[in-house]
């Protein structure tokens, strides 16, 4: 039987870790406005108040208190402009059409200034469409805008209260997600050491690249969350501790990303050896340790590092010594560096223990984070100008959304559809920046809407009372936000149910059911036509540009690593920027290839080559990361010259012909071979990693031709 103290601690942890989350804030805000409208016998107020809460929640942006207040002011101003403009221009169709097209394009283009402004812009367009849905509900034009803004204000009030009570929880949540993503990446890495050697057919490097892409995105999110708390001179000790957790995750990522050997060849030649099993098992246990760190952050308990790792690493060392008696010396040396890297990951995991983290080397090095926010009017103009071209995905998306909304409005006006503005709402949610995401969301939207109508009609009959309907509206609104990030079809189902019950307050619940289905189909159709025929992605995919960007980011990473070997290891911000840029570029390449439709490739060979180039680029990045993870000052001028020769070769690589590339790589190979390997371990590591990079550059030269020719 569970004791009361254990139950009390469980509920305490649950409240502290869950109370700040979005669904709870939604529940409190919606309950307050529903209760207010019911007590004052004005249930019609519920509709704009609830829609205002939904719009505000969809545009809620995490930040420190002053930043959050600034975001709220900007958001409410944009909401006010959007809703008042609709009310004033609605009686004049031509002016309204022009305003709808220009304003939606302008709002989407604000995304060039950063994700914060992209989110606010989406909320402003959403508020404008919500205003269209409520035209005619109130006798005065200004009443609906006031209620929409009031609903948003109620939600933002609760977000501020929540922030004051739990200021650190959003950052801790991002750290929890980061260590969970790190665990998934380590598990993907473990498949490369599958002792059964069956991973060849499963494209292990491709899966690893995709896992790396997700981890990089999460690292960017947690960096933004921490950075918002660190701006200024009054950052709390909690924020600085979160920064140390972030740096540990970065260090583990670099080491986990490192490759010291060709893994597929290792599987072919060593699948019978116990060392493969031990490496795989170590990585899986380290993944479990990352999950335990995430759990310790969730429950506010100290992470306890297992002593099992030391025994496992010692046994792996013994296994390697046994193998070295008959195996190739170079391969054994590479595996020795691999085990050293796994031991370093173990040391980073151990440093997370609360009594050790404050005493790590991170306290004595550069812990500055690069700032990527707006830096004056010149920066704003530069960012906007860089996106004023069809080559920009943001520009193409802005044009599509603008035209889709205008076409939807013309369709509604041409056949005098009542409540037809659900077409615009559907198009806004379904029309995504790329074809694949739009097609996927389109299907989920239709399924969710149909299911919502089928479930909603009996519920309208079963819940005739006003209090019951208000409770249902709140419940379905909360469920929408609970599912919107993980199950879009279910989220659409719940928002459809919420809409049905909202309109049932006007006595129109049964009347809007069938039109809702038609509006959804028309809105989805317009969104599909837009992404198919208006600046289609496969005409602007610019894969060669993305490949070049990823490659040049790797070049800058090699430069930064070389400087560390020449001048000594540190964690300066310039090194971390180069490392992060390389991973971001690799993640972007993975995203472009993963989202590519069959229409994006000129032939099956080109499509297959895209997966090969992704895996090859990730291998190149992992070999560079191995150099970075073991970076130490070297006094050997031959090694420094070799690294600078590698950097020069990689810089010229893209401008050379195939024959010149092969000649340059042959010269670099000769330079590496001319350095005599002795007992100095660092010398062997650098020469081996340079050899792997040379081999990867040769492979990249082979696989990129079908893509660049397509």
Image (tube, rainbow, N blue to C red):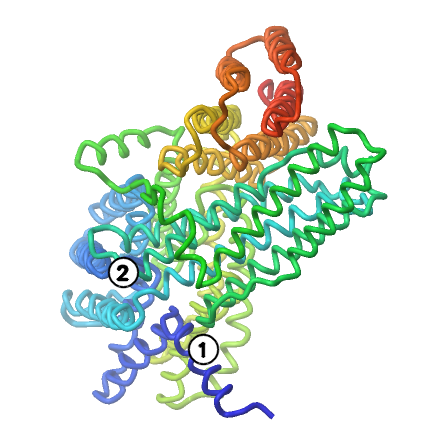
- Name the outermost residue toward the front: 679
Q: In which quarter of the image is the C terminus?
A: top right
Of the image marks 2 and 1, the number of the one nearer the N terminus:
1
Q: How far apart are marks 2 and 1 (CA)?
A: 24 Å
Residue plotted at (34% across, 45% down): 367
Residue in view at x 33 percent, y 62 percent:
238
- Measured along the vertical axis of the image, is residue 163 above or below residue 72? below
- The residue wearing badge 2 is 236
**Which image quadrant for residue 450?**
bottom right
SS for callout 1 = helix
Numbered badge on residue 448? none
Let me know if residue 418 appears in the view: no
As drawn, the label of residue 14 is 1
Secondary structure under the numbered disc 2 in the rendered image: loop
Of 324 and 549, which appears nearest the observer? 324
**Is 388 on the left or on the right of 487, as rendered?**
left
């Amino acid at each position: 039987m569970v004791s009361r103290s254990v139950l009390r601690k469980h509920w305490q942890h649950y409240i502290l870790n869950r109370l700040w989350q979005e669904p709870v804030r939604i529940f409190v805000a919606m309950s307050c406005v529903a209760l207010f409208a019911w007590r004052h016998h004005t249930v019609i107020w519920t509709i704009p108040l609830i829609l205002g809460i939904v719009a505000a929640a969809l545009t809620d942006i995490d930040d420190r208190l002053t930043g959050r207040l600034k975001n709220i002011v900007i958001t409410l101003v944009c909401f006010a402009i959007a809703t008042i403009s609709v009310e004033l221009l609605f009686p004049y169709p031509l002016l309204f059409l022009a305003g709808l097209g220009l304003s939606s394009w302008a709002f989407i283009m604000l995304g060039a200034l950063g994700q914060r402004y992209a989110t606010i812009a989406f909320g402003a367009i959403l508020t404008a469409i919500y205003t269209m849905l409520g035209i005619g509900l109130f006798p005065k034009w200004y009443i609906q805008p006031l209620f929409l803004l009031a609903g948003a204000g109620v939600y933002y009030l609760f977000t501020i209260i929540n922030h004051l009570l739990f200021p650190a929880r959003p950052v801790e949540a991002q750290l929890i997600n980061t260590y969970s993503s790190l665990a998934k990446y380590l598990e993907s890495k473990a498949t490369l050491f599958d002792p059964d050697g069956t991973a060849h057919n499963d494209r292990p490097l491709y899966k690893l690249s995709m896992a790396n892409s997700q981890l990089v995105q999460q690292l960017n999110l947690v960096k933004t969350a921490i950075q918002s708390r660190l701006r200024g001179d009054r950052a709390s000790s909690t924020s600085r501790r979160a920064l140390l957790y972030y740096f540990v995750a970065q260090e583990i990522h670099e080491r986990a990303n490192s490759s010291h050997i060709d893994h597929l060849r290792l599987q072919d030649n060593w699948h019978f050896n116990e060392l493969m099993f031990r490496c795989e098992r170590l990585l899986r246990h380290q993944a479990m340790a990352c999950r335990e760190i995430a759990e310790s952050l969730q429950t506010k308990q100290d992470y306890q590092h297992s002593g099992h790792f030391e025994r496992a690493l010692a046994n792996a060392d013994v296994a390697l010594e046994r193998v070295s008696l008959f195996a190739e010396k170079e391969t054994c040396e590479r595996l020795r560096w691999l085990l050293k890297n796994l031991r370093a990951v173990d040391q980073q995991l151990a440093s997370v223990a609360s009594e050790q983290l404050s005493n790590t080397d991170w306290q004595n090095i550069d812990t500055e984070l690069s700032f990527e926010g707006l830096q004056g009017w010149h920066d704003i103009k530069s960012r906007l100008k860089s996106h004023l071209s069809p080559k920009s995905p943001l520009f193409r998306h802005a044009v599509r959304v603008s035209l889709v909304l205008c076409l939807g409005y013309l369709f509604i006006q041409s056949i005098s559809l009542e409540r037809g503005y659900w077409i615009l709402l559907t198009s806004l949610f379904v029309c995504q920046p790329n074809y694949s995401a739009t097609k996927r969301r389109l299907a989920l939207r239709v399924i969710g809407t149909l299911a919502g109508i089928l479930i909603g009609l009996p519920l309208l009959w079963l819940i005739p009372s006003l209090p019951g309907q208000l409770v249902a509206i709140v419940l379905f609104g909360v469920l929408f936000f609970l599912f919107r990030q993980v199950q879009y079809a279910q989220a659409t189902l719940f928002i459809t149910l919420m809409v049905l019950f909202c309109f049932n307050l006007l006595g129109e619940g049964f009347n809007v059911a069938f039109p809702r289905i038609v509006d959804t189909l028309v809105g989805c159709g317009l969104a599909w036509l837009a992404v198919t025929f208006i600046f289609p992605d496969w005409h602007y995919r610019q894969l060669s540009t993305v490949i070049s960007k990823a490659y040049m980011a790797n070049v800058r990473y090699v430069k930064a690593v070389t400087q560390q070997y020449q001048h000594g290891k540190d964690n300066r911000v310039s090194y971390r920027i180069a490392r992060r840029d390389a991973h971001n570029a690799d993640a972007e390449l993975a995203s472009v290839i993963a989202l590519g439709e069959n229409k994006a490739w000129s032939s099956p060979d080109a499509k297959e080559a895209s997966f090969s180039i992704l895996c090859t680029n990730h291998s190149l990045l992992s070999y560079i990361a191995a150099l970075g993870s073991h970076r130490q000052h070297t006094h050997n001028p031959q090694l420094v010259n070799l690294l600078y020769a590698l950097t020069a070769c990689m810089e010229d690589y893209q401008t050379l012909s195939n024959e010149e590339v092969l000649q340059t790589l042959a010269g670099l190979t000769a330079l590496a071979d001319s350095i005599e390997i002795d007992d100095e371990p660092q010398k062997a590591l650098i020469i081996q990693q340079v050899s792997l990079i040379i081999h990867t550059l040769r492979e990249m030269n082979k696989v990129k031709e079908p893509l660049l020719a397509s």
